[in-house]
Amino acid sequence: MRVAQFDRYGPPEVLYATTAPLPVVRPGEALVRVHGASVNGGELTMRAGKLRFLLNRRFPKRIGIDFAGEVVTAAEGVAGPKVGDHVWGMVNKWRGGAIAEYVAVAPRTLSRSPKGVDLVEAASLPVGTTAITALRDHAHLKRGERLLVRGAAGGVGSIAVQLGHWMGAHVTGLAAAGNLDLVRDLGADEVFDYRTTGPADLGEFDVILDSAGTDLRAYRRLLAPGGRMVAITVSSPADAAYLLASAVFGSRRIRFFAGNPTNALFAELTGYVESGAIRPVVDTVHELGDIAEAHRALERGGVRGKHVIRLANA
Ligand SMILES: NC(=O)c1ccc[n+]([C@@H]2O[C@H](COP(=O)([O-])OP(=O)(O)OC[C@H]3O[C@@H](n4cnc5c(N)ncnc54)[C@H](OP(=O)(O)O)[C@@H]3O)[C@@H](O)[C@H]2O)c1
């Protein structure tokens, strides 16, 4: 099968497509033929070597976390999707390897993908589990509340805007100037260019979802009494320190989590898509051989939704 991998940490050019044996399917795992897999911000960080202290030293390393595809061998002895089912899910994020023609995964992180959504486009959506976890489980967003989404045109943000709108919040999106139209289309009530509009120009919010990870202190100050802020990334040691120190603010601390979605959460995401609450937002579909360009494109900035790698033509 064809896979994407790299032999050393470095710039996008270290990535290449090659062939490898089919994955070994362990007891309790299903074999999935992948149609599409997305490119995540965290994978750029991993490829660049910034997470090397968390990873083993072995190379080559595979890349990619979430995928959409079709079950070719069902997991034996475990309830879950059957042969031929269209599914989405994720591989172990520390091992990677979703950008491959086949993956072996346990049904624990596998669920039926939405009907009527092409599997390559569907690959843009699994990161929506992060938006659900952030807005519902950590921020407890309620109808009528004022929600600010930083990074509103990005992979997580573009889904958070849709979900926030569907949950009945008044959504404000911060994004690059060229993406304000997209963010408004996704359901934001107000949109601002983050390069010309700073925290001082924005007013108060009940919930802030931060997918930029910068200036956390300045944004936390925008919380109304009883407000909740969730950050899904930190971009500097100072922001990391502020996030940790924010625990002293009690209920107004900045909440942080590392997503570890189960099949129940993926199934819920399927429900949101089938009900029309969330739709895929695909910036570009890249062929596997263009994996380095896909990373370069996300690094350049200005992303509109997700970059997706096509592994199979349906
Ligand atoms: N904790 C978790 O479980 C979890 C899960 C998923 C992702 N993450 C992390 O969360 C981050 C976002 O993920 P993603 O997939 O959404 O990344 P992404 O697609 O690259 O989106 C990030 C967005 O943030 C925007 N942005 C950058 N600087 C900004 C600023 N100062 N103000 C407002 N917006 C700004 C970017 O705009 P430009 O394109 O104009 O730069 C881009 O639209 C990544 O670091 C990722 O690793 C964490």
Image (cartoon, grey):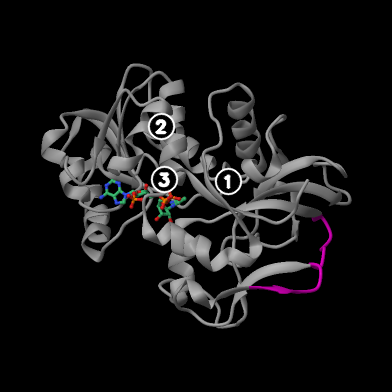
Residue found at x 32% / y 22%? 189
- Residue 152 percent across, percent down from the top left: 36, 39
Q: Residues within 10 Å of mark 3 (few under 14, many from 20)?
A: many
The residue beneath circle 3 is 154
Query: Disc 1 marks which amino acid?
Result: Pro
Q: Which residue is mark 2?
A: 161
Beta carbon of the mark 3 residue lies under 8 A of ligand 1: yes
Mark 1 to mark 2: distance in Å? 20 Å
In the rendered image, residue 180, in percent from the top left (x then y), is placed at: 32, 35
Give the magenta range.
17-30
Q: Nearer the N terminus, badge 3 or badge 1?
A: 3
Q: Measure the C-alpha gap from mark 3 to mark 1.
A: 19 Å
Query: Can you say whether 36 is above or below 230 in the image?
Result: below
State the predominant SS element of the stretch in magenta: loop
Q: Nearer the viewer, residue 289 or 195?
A: 289
Q: Position of residue 108 (x, y in %)?
A: 70, 47
28 with respect to 225 (left or right): right
Looking at the figure, which quarter contains the N terminus? Answer: bottom right
